[in-house]
Amino acid sequence: MLQVNAVDLGYGDQHVVHAAQLHLAKGEIGCLLGPSGCGKTTLLRAIAGFEPVRGGSMVLAGQTVATPQASLPPQKRDIGMVFQDHALFPHLNVAGNIAFGLHQWPAAERAPRVEEMLALVGLQGRGDSWPHQLSGGQQQRVALARALAPKPGLLLLDEPFSSLDTSLRESIAREVRNILKQAQTTALMVTHDQNEAFAIADHIGVMAQGRLLQWDSAVQVYAHPPTPEVAQFIGEGVLLAAQSLGSQGWRTALGILPPAHPHFLSASGEVRVLLRPEHVGLMDVTVASPRTTPPIPIAQVAQVVQVVFRGSHFIYTLLLPDGSHLLAQALAHQQYALGQAVGVFLMDTYTAYTD
């Protein structure tokens, strides 16, 4: 449905996006994820037809819509758009807002389509309500219904949840995903919020400084980032320096890792290992040692230097003997104090305690 082929974008002498490459099949949901100023919104606007292409091409449903030489106008691209501020018309009720894009439809088909959209977004019976009578989440669903009503080939969403409370964003994102999947709509969203991206997207594109560093499934982006930049931006974790010991493996501040360990990253000739908090197990060294069965039997003593409570679990920042820091995740009942010495090991399975 969408192909972005080595696209370059910019303003004047400023290069904003460099050689962006991505694709979406029909019915898939993609997300461009990155910090402010990385170029993700500019790329979205170029797909919509609002920004010219300096290099590469864009293809929608098999039709080339943008090259440096020619560009199809936005109104001819069969694209719907949902904006940050919902952009609902205050002088129109909910039904009027949804019907706004249906002026070219036969009159007899407009009202049934509006009712269909109200049902799709869970707002049955609210067609006569006014935008100011709705909550932020309900306004977002009306904006989505209005964009979906004309049955666009591609839906673009520009930070659609940024005006909502942080506590609502992830749940609304899951709702929107269900709606888009039910409507079998191809969509591309822009956000700086990782939780939103993981909640809604089939494919995530991580952007930094105008470059699309990775375009892959959410699982692959989290588990197998291709560069240290992606690894540090996605989720939580630490990159530990590693020295090659040939066939024996890699020497790190935690001990020797086997050569086949899957989390290694290389940058500028330096090899580093990515360790997420859930990869790290802790044990109390002041009591009898538990029997552990980690697939990588490495143990080290570290000091707890920071504790963050996340409700169901803690995130501990640990200081290793060589001065390196490490993050570890532990369940809420497994508490350690600031300054406490703890045993550290890598685990991918479980820890079994003796009686």
Image (cartoon, rainbow, N blue to C red):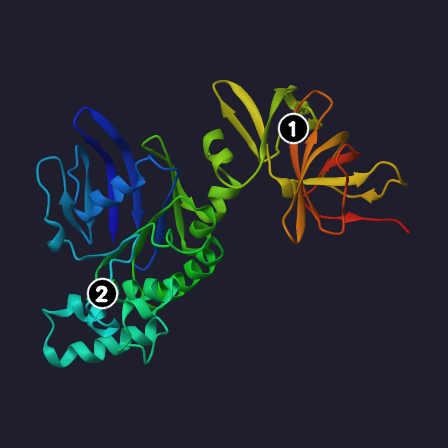
Q: Where does residue 22 sit, x and y in percent of width and height?
A: 31, 43
Q: Residue at x 33, y 79 (%)?
A: 124
| Vertical order, 179 against 31 (above or below) | below
Task: Identify which amino acid the numbered label 2 is placed on.
Answer: Pro
For marks 1 and 2, the one nearer the N-term is 2
Q: Mark 1 against mark 2, which lies toward the viewer?
A: 2
- Residue corresponding to mark 1: 325
Quarter holding residue 46: top left
Q: Are marks 1 and 2 in contact (CB under 8 Å)?
A: no
Determine the CA span between mark 1 and mark 2.
53 Å
| Vertical order, 120 against 263 (above or below) | below
Q: Where does residue 171 sit, x and y in percent of width and height?
A: 47, 60
Q: Where does residue 68 sit, x and y in percent of width and height?
A: 12, 35
- Residue corresponding to mark 2: 90
Question: Regarding mark 1 in the picture, which secondary structure is present there?
Answer: strand
Q: Residue at x 53, y 29 (%)?
A: 265
Give the crowd class for mark 1: few <14, some 14-19, many >=20 residues within 10 Å: some
